[in-house]
Amino acid sequence: MFPQFSRHWVPLCLAADVRADRPLALSLANERLVLFRNGEGHPCALRDVCPHRGVALSLGRVERGQITCPFHGWRFDGTGQCRHVPWTPDAKLDTLSATALPIREKGGLIWIFTAREAEGEPRVPEILLQPGLRLTAQSFHWRAHWTRVMENMLDTPHLPFVHGATIGKGLRGRTNEKMEMIWQETEYGAQISAIRAGEEPRQNLRYHFPNIMELVIDPGGRTMRMLAVCSPAQPGETRLTIYTLRNFAKSRLFDPLFARVNARIAREDQAIIESSFPQEVPLARDERSVASDAPTLAFRKIWFSRIKPDRSVDDSAIEARQENGT
């Protein structure tokens, strides 16, 4: 299950999107999932595959905390246990279960573990636990490997070139200056700092293992954060979900304004990242890098050593490039 992305806690969607009256279909790392709430209101996640004839359970209905397959009416609870098979009163229900997956509701989001048995608990970014914030979400589907999208989210030097009319406008005339990028490991992942001549270090980027970028904006002492979650979907595709949190302009009437800004910036990145070749990030030695690429090289090391199961990273090659700026 979940090839190249197994055994990780990752956020899937807003908790409010999971309902007790209808199923929610999502995909993650080439696995189809269906989410709903059981009779006690707790979220549940099953593989979106009926064990009988393989159809999508998400095309069925949810009633009294159980989901019914649309094909032959088999009914399953939130643990995957088969509870009813029409026409077969003597069916051995214990042998007919669907596949359930570990799921948690924390910080206003739904988290899933990408294996059948949970290990530990989700490491939730602190900003999601802060009360009084407006939390919204929007998703984009890119034809790109999620590792390329993740590296883009951790990359500051591209701002004046890709986002010269938006968030990179202030950097357009400064590209001859030196920019030093610092990757400092933390218990949740890393703190990323950008240091430019004559300025205090900007520590506004955070990496949350395995697939979250947190952008600290906080204008004028107010709180505003963006969490970019780069989730592998079908092969060669990424679902980029941007969660916005703010303690001002909290009326839902302002949501479209923030969503339009996010969508514009995402469009600026999309065509560039979708053109990447190869689609999946290669070993550091296979592309040319410089010192300001430190964060993306650090993520690349994590990808090969901690996330992707079937290859190991050449640590010495990455470290040498970081030190030599080549």
Image: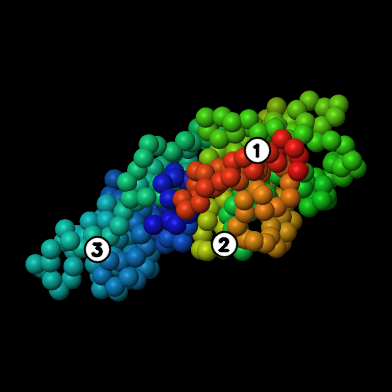
Report how far apart the C-alphas of labels 3 and 2 lie in the structure. Answer: 32 Å
Q: Give the amino acid type for the residue marked by disc 1 in the picture.
A: Glu
Above or below, 95 against 245 in this view is: below
Residue 215 visible in rendering: no
Q: Provide the residue designation for mark 2.
A: 237
Report how far apart the C-alphas of labels 1 and 3 lie in the structure. Answer: 54 Å
- Give residue 146's quadrant in the image: bottom right
Above or below, 14 against 92 in this view is: above
Q: Provide the residue designation for mark 1.
A: 319
Q: Secondary structure at mark 1?
A: helix
Above or below, 124 against 234 in this view is: above
Q: Provide the residue designation for mark 3.
A: 75
Image quadrant containing the N terminus: bottom left
Q: Give the amino acid type for the residue marked by disc 3 in the picture.
A: Arg
Q: Secondary structure at mark 3?
A: strand
Residue 179 screen position, x and y as percent: 80, 36
Q: Nearer the viewer, residue 66 or 57?
A: 57
Return the disc, 1 or 2, that comes first in the chain's sequence. Answer: 2
